[in-house]
Image (spheres, rainbow, N blue to C red):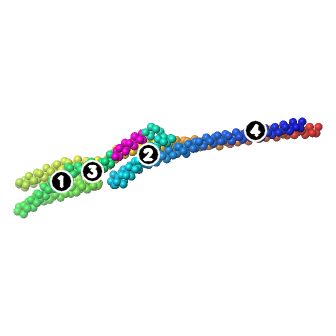
Amino acid sequence: MRLDSAKRLGLILFAGIGAIFVLTAVTISLTITKTETLQHHSQKVLENEIPYVIHLMDLESQVYKTVNGLNEYLISGDIGDLLNFRQDMILLKEMINSQAQQVEADYKVTSLMKVIYNKYNAKAKEVIEIKGDYQLNFIGIVKAAELLNPLHLQFSGALNNLIDIQLEESVETDRREVLDRLIKMKNAWTNMIISLRSYFTTKSDFDRDQLNFFRDETQSAMIDLLDIRQQLDFDAVFIDELGQIYRIYMQNLPEVLGLYQTEKWRMDFYVTRNEIYPITDNLRKLVRSLVEKRKLQTAENSLELNTEVDQLGDRSRYILIVALLIILLVLFIVVRSVSSLLSQLEIQRNS
């Protein structure tokens, strides 16, 4: 009988220890499973999403770098700046190509980036060619040389001849008024040409106002000169010639000024601002939209990860509490069973 009681006691202890072991194993198994899930999500963020965002930010920065490099070359004309720009463009192309290898990349977006890059590269080559062609690039200066410079030389030559003639004749006749008006015309014309050249150089409001002032002064001097043409006898034909040159010059001047008052005064800058900048802006905005989208996705994943961590903590606490309660229950049953057996043994021994 004692042997049977001992066996029952052993079985109860073994069952209790087994139950505790099973509960502990289940608790550990659930915790490990959930931890592996969290680890998988964390690894996905670290290996895919964060590197992808960094890649996009580097890509956007490279777009800026190429635009700045192109501007530096257009300003300096240095071959070293041109080589740096071309190297930056090669790197930009490589970064766009590597975009397709990113796990998080979208094929359609990557293809669109390549299309935009090809447009950018083609326009950049066009601008570089314009930069190397003086006639095509500096159309304002070329137009001034074509429409204004020959007339200026003709006008100055004819005016100086008239002044020389009047200087010789004024010794014998009283032609002082004619000479004064010719000199006034020369001074006004010279001041207008100087202010025009200054405006071409600076494009400042002050030089523009100076040009307008001396242009009005030149017009007034020409009117005064034409008023006394009858006093010049046969020299009046030279005044008529001077007036004709003056009219043609003033007719051509607005066309030249129109170029300088717009960005077309220098074609490489004009094409860069009006054709290249929109292309690079589109590429930059596309990359920026991907960055913002990916940042939002990463934030959502981080929030989800934090939620899962909180859930794991709560679940672990619940499992631990339940396991402790079950263990206490098992211990209670074991102790009670052992006490009962011991009582029976004690009764049997006394009897």
Q: Callout 1: helix, strand or loop?
A: helix
- Kind of residue sitting beneath label 1: His
Sequence order check, earlier mark of 1 and 3? 3
Q: Give the range drawn in magenta.
A: 112-125
**Rendered location of residue 14, percent (x, y):** 79, 39
Residue at 7 percent of width and 55 percent of height: 235
Residue at 34 percent of width and 44 percent of height: 123
Q: Residue 152 carries which label?
A: 1
Residue 58 appears in the picture as rendered? yes
Sequence order check, earlier mark of 4 and 2? 4
C-alpha gap between disc 1 and disc 3: 22 Å
**Rendered location of residue 259, percent (x, y):** 26, 48
Sequence order check, earlier mark of 4 and 3? 4
Which of discs 1 and 3 lies nearer the camera? The answer is 3
Q: Quadrant of residue 217?
A: bottom left
C-alpha gap between disc 4 and disc 3: 93 Å
Q: What residue did someone put label 3 on?
A: 134
C-alpha gap between disc 4 and disc 2: 62 Å
Which of discs 2 and 3 lies nearer the camera? The answer is 2
46 vs 140, left or right, is right
Taken as a whole, is the magenta stretch helix, strand or loop? helix
Q: In which quarter of the image is residue 228?
A: bottom left
Q: Examine the structure image and report whether residue 122 is included in the region drawn in magenta.
A: yes
210 vs 34, left or right, is left
- Kind of residue sitting beneath label 4: Ala
Q: Local crowd at mark 2 within 10 Å, few (<14), some, or many (≥20)?
A: few
